[in-house]
């Protein structure tokens, strides 16, 4: 693609001078596109166009829209990759239920260097801005729920999506109560205590009978 410069000559859009300048331009463009159009509405092509680069460069530097979003939001982990690692059998202790392992893995990720601050920033923005809430909701639906759904049971796609959403509500509620509202018992509890208390509920959401209230 070509474009005229101020002297009327034709110039070619593409790599800017220096990788760091190109990365910065892409990130600046991405932040604007995500803010204006949400996670779903922002496209790699539009982000590249606003940055004045070829879409192939965006893929070269960031690989996927999820990775670009994480970089733009200064989020130092890739949610879908973290969830897939937590769901992998080889990453669990022998005999540890999957629900407890997921809770323990989420807490370890949230409390790793740099993640807590970035995660709190996303939650804080979502609580105070409908636009930020919509962007986070779309991002969670596209990356987190899709990854969790791969481990959830369900007789059809609707039930599987419902199970994944229940798990997300449990984990996001834990994050809000522990890190934002700082409810004393939850903020003071160890990862082992929380995994033991919340894990069975996650297991039920994953594959249990959602109609059984345990009171029969």
Image (spheres, rainbow, N blue to C red):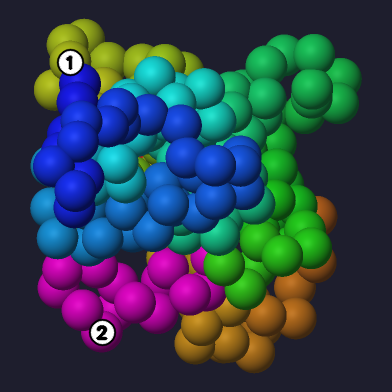
Q: Which residue is mark 2?
A: 128
Residue at the (66%, 61%) spot, across then down: 115
Image quadrant occupied by the N terminus:
top left
Magenta span has 120? yes
Residue at the (55%, 59%) spot, across then down: 74
Question: Disc 1 or disc 2, which is closer to the eye?
Answer: 2
> Relative to 109, is 42 above or below?
above
Spatial CA distance of label 1 from label 2 is 32 Å
Kindly state the secondary structure of the residue where label 1 is placed.
helix
Kindly state the secondary structure of the residue where label 2 is placed.
helix
Q: Is 124 placed left or right of 180 in the picture?
A: left
The front one of 170 and 117 is 117
> Relative to 9, is 199 above or below?
below
Point out residue 28 in the picture as x, y percentages from the top left corner.
39, 58
Label annotation for residue 50:
none
Quadrant of res 170: bottom left
Point out residue 100 in the picture as x, y percentages from the top left corner.
67, 40
Q: Which residue is mark 1?
A: 157
Q: Is 55 placed left or right of 88 in the picture?
A: left
Residue stretch in magenta: 119-134
**Is the magenta region chiefly helix, strand or loop?**
helix
Quadrant of res 129: bottom left
The front one of 142 and 12 is 12
Q: Answer few, some or many: residues within 10 Å of disc 1's Cα (few below 14, many 20 plus, some between 14 and 19).
A: few
């Amino acid at each position: 693609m070509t474009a005229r410069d101020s002297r009327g000559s034709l110039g070619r859009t593409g790599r800017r001078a220096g990788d760091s300048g190109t990365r910065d331009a892409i990130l600046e463009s991405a932040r604007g596109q995500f803010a204006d159009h949400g996670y779903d509405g922002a496209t790699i092509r539009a982000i590249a166009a606003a940055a004045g680069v070829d879409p192939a460069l965006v893929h070269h530097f960031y690989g996927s829209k999820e990775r670009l979003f994480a970089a733009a939001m200064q989020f130092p982990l890739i949610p879908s990759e973290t969830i897939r690692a937590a769901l992998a059998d080889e990453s669990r202790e022998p005999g540890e239920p999957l629900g407890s392992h997921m809770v323990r893995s989420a807490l370890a990720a949230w409390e790793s260097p740099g993640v807590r601050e970035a995660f709190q920033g996303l939650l804080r923005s979502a609580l105070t801005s409908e636009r930020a809430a919509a962007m986070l909701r779309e991002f969670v639906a596209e990356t987190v729920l899709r990854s969790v759904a791969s481990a959830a049971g369900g007789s059809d796609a609707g039930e599987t999506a419902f199970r994944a959403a229940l798990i997300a509500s449990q984990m996001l509620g834990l994050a809000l109560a522990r890190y934002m509202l700082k409810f004393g018992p939850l903020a003071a509890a160890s990862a082992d205590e929380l995994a033991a208390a919340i894990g069975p509920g996650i297991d039920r959401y994953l594959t249990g009978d959602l109609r059984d209230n345990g009171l029969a």
